[in-house]
Image (cartoon, helix red, strand yellow):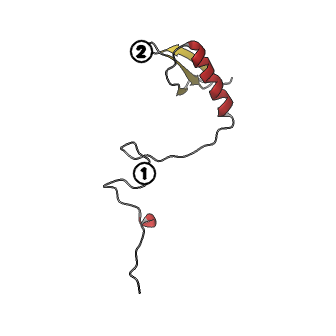
Amino acid sequence: MAGQFEIFTDAESNVRFRLLAADGTVLAISKAYTDKRAAADGIMEVRECAGTGLIKETRTNAWGGTGRNRPGVPTPSHRRHRHFPAV
């Protein structure tokens, strides 16, 4: 059996959907929508994009940014820029 989408109302009375695996495991939960029609449109967008979507890895720091350097965290030696004196 394939997975399925399930539309539900959350504790704040927002309409959301979740994607369930065949065994019932929750794989994803959507953002809040204003009504069931908007949630159904969201499901259609996920269906359209999921089969062709690329995988992209993003690294974030503890403060929510995606900067390369984090204050207080040493840079690995293979990524350090070495400056040599002019000869």
Residue 60, position in %: x, y? 43, 46
Residue 76, position in %: x, y? 41, 62
Residue under the point 30% across and 55% down = 72
Q: Earlier in the sequence, mark 2 or mark 1?
A: 2
Quadrant assignment for the N terminus: top right
Nearest the viewer among 5 and 46 is 46
User: In this rendering, which labeled residue sits more in front, label 2 or label 1?
Assistant: 1
Q: CA distance from mark 2 to mark 1?
A: 34 Å
Q: Which residue is mark 1?
A: 67
Give the SS element for disc 1: loop
> Local crowd at mark 2 within 10 Å, few (<14), some, or many (≥20)?
few
Residue under the point 50% across and 24% down = 31
Q: Which residue is mark 2?
A: 12
Quadrant assignment for the C terminus: bottom left
**Vertical placement of residue 66 versus 28, above or below:** below
Residue 18, position in %: x, y? 55, 22
Give the SS element for disc 2: loop
